[in-house]
Amino acid sequence: MIMQRIFTYLQMFFRLFFCGVLLFVFTAQGDWANAAKKDSGGQRFVTIDFNDVDLNLFIKYISELTGKNFVVDRSVKGKVTIISPSRISEEDAYRVFESVLEVHGFTTVPSGAIIKIVPAVQARSKSITTVRQGDSPFPDDKMVTQIIPLTHSDPNELKKILAPLVSKTSVVIAHPKSGMLIITDVLSNINRLMDIIKVLDVPSVGEDLEIMPLAHASAANVGKTITQLFLRSGKKGARSRSVKVIPYDRTNSLIVFAPRAMMQKIRDLVEKLDSKALRGGGKIHVYYLQHANAEELVKVLNNLPAQQSGGKTKKGKAPLLSKDLKISADVETNALIITAPRDEYLVLEEVIKKLDIPRKMVYLEALIMEVSVDKE
């Protein structure tokens, strides 16, 4: 009986002890939020360390810490984990808060004495702060609308370049009449886009872009020739160095980006290079034999002296054929298929004509006689 009473007293003691501990913790949390530690300069510092805490509880904590009034959209949900080993200022804590909202797809929209917390997709149609170039900076994760005046570039062209660089919830609007870009995004991304715009928004010195379709020549070959030509002349002037030629094999065209003053010169050069090849000027030739056998003649032609690797030949003698020449036979048509440059084919053609002649026929006459032997 006495032991039971002692056990009951102990239970009551431990319950009172744990209640005291919990009361102390909640009181400390209230003091943390409402009366955070201050440094010698009077700035408040807090330690933020949350593990899988409900997002709405985190918003309530920031509200108590900063004294700001929030109106939270119903769709604002999620769990928050923040690791902060050291104390940070109240101002930095609010920036962390905005970063957490951005990660979860939400943002803050000031509206008078309150701040709305809404999905980032809806934020671009709300009363977002609008800034011009040179205005005072806002927190990096704040959703803003930035007006960017352009000096040289076309707003529509820059919009196409910047479109893949903005997030899905952001908007880029081109206004050609005023020469401006209007971008709605978080400030950190806008600052990155503005750095890119500074590089692109430069005088183009009258540069043009033109697509030149080819009728006969290969776009890759013509593009390579023109590029090499202007690379050599580029040592003499900056204009030649600014010529860019991109072959587009799908339509056999050239995409040319060059100063306006040089564009006509490039057109004339492309026209001369894109000429119809002379008859027989290709590399593949077909020769139909009239008398000789194609398979037998291939064996003979392949034994002709050819240039050795390194181009060395016997003293005083030039090679008849190059080592890249190929000859094959088509039995059904009794034809030779020859892969060779035009000048080598002409040499080979003369040899074939001399070998493809009627063969002399040997006339044989036979007489069948019946011989019988009669002993009588």
Image (cartoon, rainbow, N blue to C red):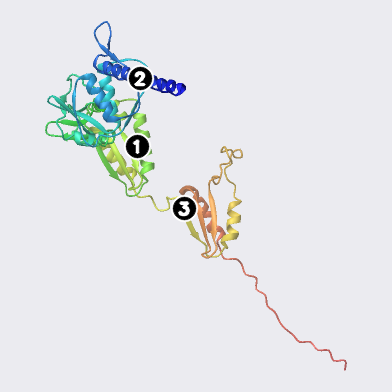
Are circles 3 and 2 on residues that touch, CB within 8 Å?
A: no
Q: In the image shown, does 91 or 263 lie closer to the viewer?
A: 91
Vertical side of 301 occupied by 64: above or below:
above
Label 2, label 1: how far apart the Cα atoms are? 90 Å
Are circles 2 and 1 on residues that touch, CB within 8 Å?
A: no
Label 3, label 1: how far apart the Cα atoms are? 26 Å
Q: In the image shown, does 339 or 208 lie closer to the viewer?
A: 208
Q: Is residue 114 left or right of 372 when viewed as pictured?
A: left
Residue that extends furthest to the right in the rendered view of this protein: 375
Q: Quadrant of residue 26?
A: top left
Relative image position of residue 269 (x, y in whole percent)? 31, 40
Q: Name the element at disc 1.
A: helix
Q: Can see residue 334?
A: yes
Residue corresponding to mark 2? 16
Residue 284, which numbered label? 3
Relative image position of residue 291 (x, y in whole percent)? 55, 65
Vertical side of 250 occupied by 246: above or below:
above
Give the amino acid at mark 2. Leu
